[in-house]
Amino acid sequence: MFDWISPRVLNRLGMLNMNKRNIDYIARYNDRSAYPLVDNKLKTKLVVEEHEVASPKLLQVVSEQHEIGHFRDRVANFDGFAIKPAKGSGGKGILVITGREGDDFVKPSGARVSLEEMERHLSNILAGLYSLGGAPDVAVIEDLVRCDPRLARYSHEGVPDIRIIVFKGYPVMAMLRLATHASDGKANLHQGAVGVGLNLANGRALNAVQFDRPVERHPDNDLLLSEIKIDNWHYLLNMASRCYEATGLGYMGVDLVVDESRGPLLLELNARPGLAIQVANGQGLLPRLKAVEALKRPHLTPEERVYWAMTQAGATHITAPRRDHPELDALLPM
Amino acid sequence: MIRHSKAPFFIATGLLILAGILLAMLRHQQLGVPWLPGQQQPVWLVEARVDFQAWGDPVTVSLNLPDSPPGFSVLSEQAASPGYGFAITERNRDRRAEWTIRQARGPQTLYFKSRLIAGDNTPAPAPDNALPPVASEVFLEGPDVAAARALIELAGSRSSSPASFTRELISLLNNPTPDQNIRLLMSDRSRSEVLYQLINYSGTPARIAEGLRLEDARRQQSLLPWLQVYDGERWVTFNPRTAEQGVPEDVLLWREEASSLLDVSGGSNSVVSFSMLRQTVPAQQIMVAEADNRAFGALSLHQLPVEQQGMFRMLLLLPFGAMVVCLMRILVGIKTSGTFMPVLIAVAFVQTSLLPGLAAFIGVVTLGLLMRGYLSSLNLLLVSRISALIILVLFITAGISIIGYQMGFSTGMTVTFFPMVILAWTIERMSILWEEEGAREVVSQGVGSLIVAVLAYLVMRAPLAEHLSFNFPELHLVVLGLILLMGQYTGYKLTELRRFTPMKRYQ
């Protein structure tokens, strides 16, 4: 019951803690004025689009109480969609609908949601129940993400997502989050989702935990977790790194999903990413963060930063970023 | 993104803490304010406040003053009343404060402050040449006469002296099932008035005195009637509510003579209310400080009107509560529901005392959670749901008070000290937490909040904290410095040492 780890061991492992994260990373590298960009999913969508980062298709925005009455007509053509509070955090208030059964909607778990419950959920979102500080909010209705089956089979009743910590534009740590029965289809580690640490060099599984305890197989479908390998890893890291240019946030969590038809999509950005990723990786964040801070001359393009980060993690056979050296025009005497 | 040097911050914080300590030491030396509480005789600061509406004519206000009240001696007296002439007059052992002004209009407020030291009992001897008091004449009519005679006869048959006669009468009046004589007399008079009339009617001199129950940091108190009976040698005081003989230690008899408490000419709607404060500073030192008004004397909170001092005494404890919250959240890592909700709950605990407060708080929140379950099925907008919750919380507190009172626990009443809106928000947050994260998280955050609240309460309740915060307000600079320092703590929280235990495998 009373099992403790000594602070000295934690220090040696380079574990980042809550106070240090808040003071030395979030407060120092995240400009307050950039927060609205990530705290509002609508704004995030628009701003990352300019930097060629794709996100799920926007179907509807419900911003007024009276629009809720027409909700049923408006979603008549959509089979699957996700309702999200624009200013929600930590996955709160997200309702995923995968199909219809008569007048009811069906959740990934197979549970039914009646139209009244749906409308109540929408009005709760508008009233600001899920937003930070209870500010009035709007509901964003997005196209349902149909996860790539190669990844989806590892997850139980929910879309697995990839969380990448991006520090000053450099990907520093990554994990895959798999929903379980215990987490009720949600990819939140503290609710019981499985966290799989990913090797930055190649996107292969390093280590897996559930409820902070190591696991080898997924508790629901018994698949061996160590065999997981994320395809297009280089591309995913580049996508995450580009979000730095889009938002200017020095320390953030980038949540990606892989759609079967559209490929990698950005789910959301997080200006206060959690610390559990360290337990999933079995490694502390601090040595990597310090390595980035120690860079005398930071790399300017996402490609160069990802190349550096992957090389640091031990990758060998990756294509070096292409550097364009424009040739000087011939110096003509005027 | 620029990395500032932290040296200026630490130097500034260090200076802040140093300044606080130095100022406190100076105050200790200059004014002799002791470091520890409870080293002196208690000094009571009682303030009478007279409010009235002036008509625009010459105004004369005359207030009865205590004259060597039993159990107390007056250290100093002082009146605050801008624009008024002031004098203390004494006529036939009747001391009065008199304020006068040529013209005044509108609401007027006059203060009279008296500093009393307890335990110094010197009953003033009656002047030798004074005539012994005689019973006042009482005029009773018709059926009242018969009722009064019957009662006097009944009480007289069971007693042997004026004192025992009075005790008998009071216990007759206190009978939970009064006979019809008592009901008749009590129908249009107050209890003390009936006693006054009956005892005087029987031929024993009696009078009604007015006393003030002294409780620390009370405001807007009024006087309670006490019965005094002349037993042939001296006046004996009785509590007309309990028949108890003598003046309790915590009661100050403000008016003993039979004159009026307050006379106002040139105004109407006059009211007297009293505030009081218990001081632990040596009486002599206060007088010295006031006499020559040294630099520190003027900066002391003791200069404020007593009413404000009472409020400050509570407010000045808040920083300690805030520091406890900082400690528990930054260094220990206890989760609470709402950042400073625990401090507000702790303030309420100070009023209710701990155990009844805890029981009331848990009761209200549990009942509220049950009712909130129904509200959530009504499909309400957030604002109206919270508003409905506030009203429900009001009903719950009223219910707890009434049931508690019926069952004989007066502590049930104290539930009203809890801030309603905070309670409503706590219930709302807990309920959302329940739906989203499950009951476990609700219990863990609820228990966390209560632990922090109880710790904050214990700190704020400590006599040392109360003494230091009020007498050395500059020590709050030290608290501020410590809180700023804690804001820079980047080490592990205690709870993180447990949370990251699984990392042991990877070392």
Image (cartoon, coloured by chain):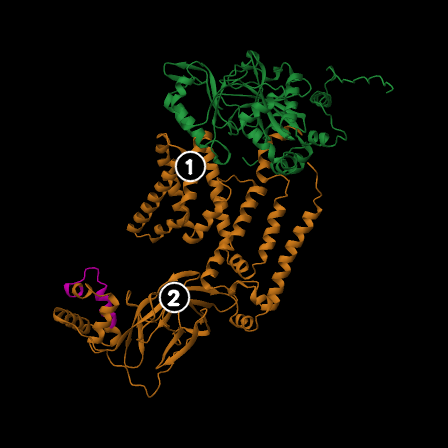
Chain colours: A green, B orange
Q: Which mark is residue B428?
A: 1
Judge by depth and name the residue closer to the eye, B12 or B455.
B12
- Do the residues at pointers 1 and 2 share their chain? yes
Name which residue lies at 61% across and 15% down.
A227
Q: Splitting the image into 4 quarters, where does residue A123 fall?
A: top left
Q: Quadrant of the C terminus of chain B?
A: top right
Question: The residue under label 1 is which amino acid type?
Answer: Glu
Q: Residues within 10 Å of mark 1 (few under 14, many from 20)?
A: many
Name which residue lies at 54% across and 58% down.
B469
Q: Is residue A127 above or below residue B90?
A: above
Q: Chain of mark 2?
A: B
User: Magenta residues?
Assistant: B166-182
Judge by depth and name the residue closer to the eye, B191 or B177.
B191
Name which residue lies at 65% across and 16% down.
A235
Alpha carbons under labels 1 and 2: distance apart: 50 Å
User: Where's residue B148, x and y in %?
Assistant: 16, 71
Question: The residue under label 2 is which amino acid type?
Answer: Arg
Tag 1 near tag 2, CB within 8 Å: no
Q: Secondary structure at mark 2?
A: strand
Q: Is residue A219 above or below residue B156?
A: above
Q: Magenta-highlighted stretch: main secondary structure? A: helix
Q: Is residue B146 above or below residue A131?
A: below
Q: Which mark is residue B105?
A: 2
- Describe residue B425's horizontal placement relative to residue B210 as left or right: right
